[in-house]
Image (cartoon, rainbow, N blue to C red):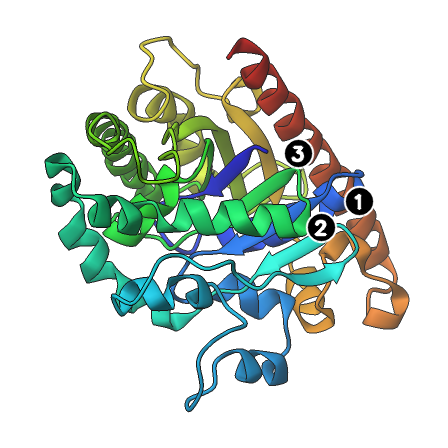
């Protein structure tokens, strides 16, 4: 069961939209998929569900039993351990664990228990591995063979605990200075988190009743999202210099290799895809609660937009297949 996080500490790069669309595409390629929203802003959840459903998920006067917080509530209150989360079936073979703004309450506890793991503190290990164990239970409920995880754009304790639960990381990027700087922050942070978790994992008590996750957090590649294009289908001049810097910066900061990666993401082995901005199709898809490649005339996609729908289908099909293939190759090396 590969678990893939989509993560960049720079916001606004289309990360959540990428998780939403790939969840649908993986399913349409015959995979069983679980999408997990571990971003306290719960943007992925808002893509899957309408406002009335969201309001029922987050009542002000009752426990949030329809979200990820159901798994954590007793642990946060010091009354027990992780519970199985609710998995919402979108279609057969595609399930969602809904996010919750209440996750922000878990941040301080995760931060405080991180150093306690070095003291072999079992309670600290139960806190730190809560997301991993909740995802594991949800995966069993959903019978999923892929788990796609959305996390927030920061380097805080919630994301550290979320990424410890993941095998692989896909990095969405935009061709701008902020994404370049984000790579410089992201790479060293992942290296530190892997090292620090390996040290802690080696001190885990043997009789906890569960195995701590490996915390692989292995970079799988990057996706350049929503770049502006000319009629020639190439990035506009203002973005060209940032596009050219992505391959080498990713190789140096995230992939941790000194190999020269060139200056063309399209020829870079670390690049999983270059995805266009599909303009009016994204808000149309969100209104219809479906991916852009499933839009029909009845949803408002007419004329040339239908050609863009087909182009999007081709792009996301290629991306999903590349991720499946790359994970298969990595797993075979284990």
First along the sequence among labels 1 and 3 = 1
Furthest toward the bottom, the residue is 61
Looking at the picture, tell me which residue is in the foreground, 257 or 44: 44
* Mark number displayed over residue 306: none
**Gap in Å between the C-alphas at discs 1 and 2?**
6 Å
Q: Residue 224, percent across and down?
A: 51, 38
Q: In the displayed structure, does residue 245 sit left or right of residue 196? A: right
Q: Residue at x 56, y 70 (%)?
A: 46
From the image, state whether disc 1 or disc 3 is nearer to you: 1
Residue hosting label 1: 28
From the image, state whether disc 2 or disc 3 is nearer to you: 2
Q: Secondary structure at mark 1?
A: helix
Q: Secondary structure at mark 2?
A: helix
Residue 15, above or below 244: below
- Mark 1, Cα crowd under 10 Å, few <14 / some 14-19 / many 20+, is some
Please say if the residues under marks 1 and 3 sit with CB atoms less than 8 Å apart: no
Residue hosting label 2: 24
- Mark 3, Cα crowd under 10 Å, few <14 / some 14-19 / many 20+, is many
């Amino acid at each position: 069961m590969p678990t893939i996080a989509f993560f960049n500490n720079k916001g606004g790069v289309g990360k959540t939209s990428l998780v939403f669309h790939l969840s649908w595409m993986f399913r349409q390629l015959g995979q069983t998929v679980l999408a997990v929203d571990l971003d306290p802003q719960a943007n992925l959840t808002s893509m899957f569900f309408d406002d009335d459903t969201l309001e029922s998920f987050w009542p002000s006067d009752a426990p949030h039993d329809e979200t990820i917080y159901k798994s954590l509530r007793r642990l946060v209150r010091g009354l027990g351990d992780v519970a199985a989360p609710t998995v919402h079936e979108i279609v057969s073979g595609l399930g969602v664990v809904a996010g919750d703004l209440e996750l922000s309450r878990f941040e301080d506890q995760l931060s405080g228990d991180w150093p306690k793991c070095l003291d072999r503190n079992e309670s600290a290990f139960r806190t730190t591995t809560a997301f991993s164990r909740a995802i594991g239970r949800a995966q069993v409920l959903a019978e999923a063979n892929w788990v796609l995880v959305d996390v927030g754009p920061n380097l805080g304790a919630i994301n550290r605990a979320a990424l410890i639960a993941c095998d692989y990381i896909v990095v969405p990027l935009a061709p701008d200075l902020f994404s370049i700087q984000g790579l410089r922050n992201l790479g060293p942070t992942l290296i530190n988190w892997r090292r620090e978790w390996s040290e802690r994992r080696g001190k885990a008590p043997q009789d906890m009743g569960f195995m701590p996750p490996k915390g692989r957090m292995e970079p799988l590649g990057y996706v350049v999202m929503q770049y502006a294009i000319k009629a020639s289908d190439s990035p506009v001049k203002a973005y060209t210099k940032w596009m050219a810097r992505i391959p080498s910066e990713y190789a140096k900061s995230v992939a941790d290799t000194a190999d020269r990666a060139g200056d063309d993401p399209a020829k870079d082995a670390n690049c999983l895809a270059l995805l266009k901005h599909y303009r009016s199709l994204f808000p149309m898809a969100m209104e219809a609660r479906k991916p852009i490649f499933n839009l029909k005339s009845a949803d408002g996609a007419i004329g040339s937009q239908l050609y863009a729908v087909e182009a999007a289908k081709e792009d996301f099909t290629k991306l999903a297949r590349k991720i499946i293939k790359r994970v298969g190759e990595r797993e075979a090396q284990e």
